[in-house]
């Protein structure tokens, strides 16, 4: 198979980290407002149990690690080999990087990018309806996850614009979309 690079992209280089952080913050805030208003009207007669700042702080502290783990679930379910490197950011924040050993299809890449939305955001919205005493905490967690998913949505957009029979490779600083020169 003779592969040519159709497009290489790095979201951070294309948009800049400051713009990504700002748009993620705006998206997270906007999603919290849009989620909180209808849910609070639905549960207006329920008292919210207040446990203070500690539980939400712990949940938000662990959310980036959980978010990245959700990206790996489709890869593990499809028996793709993944290399994981754990490290402590600033000495306390557990973080890791992962890379696949093989190339991924377009569908697998889209599923991998949308996994945190499917496995955290949608259950978070449903859980906020089911547990009215904790809906405020759950919606904060869900809205922050939506904000963190902003770069995932940008990647999905690039994957959707790619040719149908492409292969996506996780490059060191982004993604390479490869096509077979003779089949296109």
Image: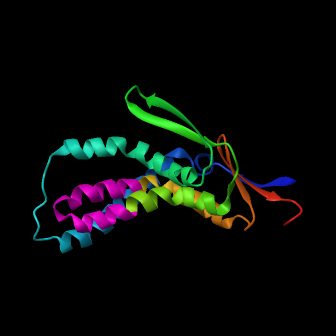
Q: Is residue 139 above or below residue 79?
A: below
Identify the residue at horizontal 49%, vertical 32% (top origin). 86
Identify the residue at horizontal 25%, vertical 47% (top origin). 56
Q: How is the image coloured?
A: rainbow
Q: Is residue 137 magenta?
A: yes
Does residue 154 appear in this view? no
Image coordinates of residue 64 in percent, x first then y, are 42, 44
Quadrant in the picture for the C terminus: bottom right
Q: Main secondary structure of the magenta part?
A: helix
Identify the residue at horizontal 39%, vertical 61% (top origin). 121
Image coordinates of residue 105 in percent, x first then y, are 68, 59
Q: Quadrant of residue 140?
A: bottom left
Q: Is residue 78 left or right of residue 28?
A: right
Q: Quadrant of residue 94?
A: top left
Q: Is residue 161 above or below residue 11?
A: below
Quadrant in the picture for the N terminus: bottom right
Please provide the residue range marked out in magenta. 122-145
Identify the residue at horizontal 14%, vertical 71% (top origin). 44
What count of labels does the image hold?
0
Q: Is residue 134 above or below residue 34?
A: above
Image coordinates of residue 87 in percent, x first then y, are 48, 29
Residue sticking out furthest to the top: 91
Q: Is residue 147 left or right of residue 157?
A: left
Q: Is residue 119 left or right of residue 35?
A: right
Does residue 13 appear in this view? yes
Image coordinates of residue 132 in percent, x first then y, are 18, 65
Q: Is residue 16 magenta?
A: no
């Amino acid at each position: 198979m003779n592969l040519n690079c159709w497009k290489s992209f790095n979201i951070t280089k294309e948009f800049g980290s400051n713009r990504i952080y700002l748009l993620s913050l705006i998206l997270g805030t906007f999603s919290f407002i849009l989620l909180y208003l209808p849910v609070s009207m639905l549960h207006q007669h329920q008292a919210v149990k207040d446990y203070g700042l500690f539980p939400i702080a712990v949940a938000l502290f662990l959310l980036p690690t959980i978010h990245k783990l959700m990206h790996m679930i489709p890869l593990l379910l499809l028996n793709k080999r993944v290399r994981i490197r754990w490290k402590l950011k600033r000495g306390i924040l557990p973080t890791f990087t992962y890379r696949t050993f093989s190339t991924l299809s377009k569908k697998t890449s889209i599923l991998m990018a949308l996994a945190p939305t499917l496995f955290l955001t949608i259950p978070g919205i449903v859980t906020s309806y089911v547990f009215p005493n904790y809906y405020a905490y759950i919606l904060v967690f869900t809205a922050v996850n939506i904000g963190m998913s902003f770069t995932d949505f940008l990647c999905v957009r690039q994957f959707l614009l790619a040719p149908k029979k492409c292969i996506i490779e996780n490059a060191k600083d982004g993604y390479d979309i490869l096509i077979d020169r003779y089949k296109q």
